[in-house]
Image: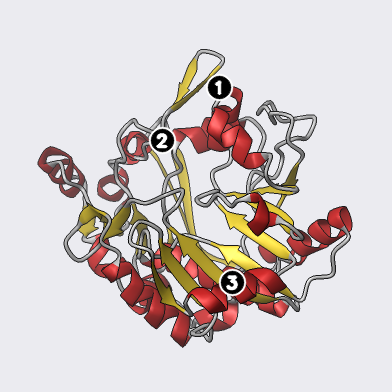
Amino acid sequence: MAFVLAVARSECEVRAAEAIYAGYVVHCPLGGYVWQAIHYLHGLRDAGVEPFFYEDTRHTWEAFDPIHRTSGTDYEAGLALAGEAFGRAGFGDSWAFFDAERNKWAGAGRDATYEAFAKARILVNAGGVHRFGAPERAGKTNVYIDMDPAYTQIRLAGGDRVLRELLHEHDVHFTFGENIGSSNCRIPTGGIRWHPTRQPVAVDLWATGPVPAEALFTTIGTWSSGGGRDVELGGERYSWRKREEWEKIVDLPRTSGVSFVLAMEVKDSTDLAWLEANGWSVRDPIAISRDADRYREFVRGSRAEFTTAKDVNVRGWLTLGATSSSGESRRSRRPRSPATWSNGRVRVQLQVTSPPKTTAGQN
């Protein structure tokens, strides 16, 4: 977080005391999105910048309702979760949601939001789910954080006009793909100067103890999101679907003797039977993640995270040049209980690590 602010300030010569963080919580009120926003808000506050969370429906209107498991324009579930989560995290008076179609405000409301925009000198657009007009951007350092590295840059190279216009409305651009723009990375930059960044983690909110002996390797996420977000570069297709990667290690529990939990909504009954026959324990992710505290307890109760990366990440991000997390946070981890498994195609080494010794907002 400090890196984001340092670059934003040095490039645009601002000394911000307040910032708008435009994120994605009400649209998809699930634990991962909620905690991502809270970590950024804490990161900004720890860096000496008072944040205000903002979300609206002008650029992205469709929302997911985790209660009825439908998508549409009913924002009530998201508003209830956002209000509770931000309140518990100490930001109860520092968030707002604007339903543009109905001209309705929630959270701090219209006047408080207008005041926050007037005072702020940094506007952070997380993931590009918002688009702001010139008056809203005026007098601010406009920061774009790319949370889908490779996918974003390949879309840009493919001629996505709306994305290009959106990016050029920002002064500084960050990405989780740490090598993008370097000489050893083949991902096209699209003429954008991409700065590497990592997500802040407010570790004080995730206190952990010793890993219980009975704890299992777990993950929570999406089993298959369809092909709607696949991209092409140089005649090659880069898939957005994790299912293709899980297929490569589907026999891992059965052949390794290690237990795993997949909190994923596997709608295809054939896929579900296939996973269970190979020893995977499949749980309902929505029941876990529609409550931010329950989501946190699921993660904290895990022996360790075990997951796969999408093809667009593996070949388009990792293989083409992005680095894995390294530095002080990795060096402070202490491995325990390694286990190695191979099916002739994929080799997996499992080990439990103690949490890295980092501080809230460290980037």
Say left or right for 32 vs 137: left
Foreground: 355 or 94?
94
The amino acid marked with disc number 3 is Tyr
C-alpha distance separating marks 2 and 3: 38 Å
Residue at numbered disc 1: 158
Q: Position of residue 98 (x, y in %)?
A: 43, 65
C-alpha distance separating marks 1 and 2: 16 Å
The amino acid marked with disc number 1 is Gly
Mark 2 / mark 3, whichever is N-terminal: 3
**What is the quadrant of residue 290 in the picture?**
bottom left
Residue visible at 21% across and 61% down?
284
The amino acid marked with disc number 2 is Trp
> Can residue 268 be seen in the rendering of this structure?
yes
Position of residue 124 relative to residue 43, above or below, is above
Residue visible at 44% across and 78% down?
107
Q: Are marks 1 and 2 in contact (CB under 8 Å)?
A: no
Residue visible at 35% across and 65% down?
29
Position of residue 258 relative to residue 296, above or below, is above
Q: Position of residue 109 (x, y in %)?
A: 47, 77
In the picture, which quadrant includes the N terminus? bottom right
> Can residue 326 be seen in the rendering of this structure?
no
Q: Position of residue 44 (x, y in %)?
A: 68, 72
Foreground: 133 or 326?
133
Mark linked to residue 114: 3
- The kind of secondary structure element at disc 3 is helix
- Depth-wise, is mark 2 or mark 3 nearer the camera? 3
Q: Position of residue 312 (x, y in %)?
A: 49, 33
Residue at numbered disc 2: 240
In the picture, which quadrant includes the C terminus? bottom right
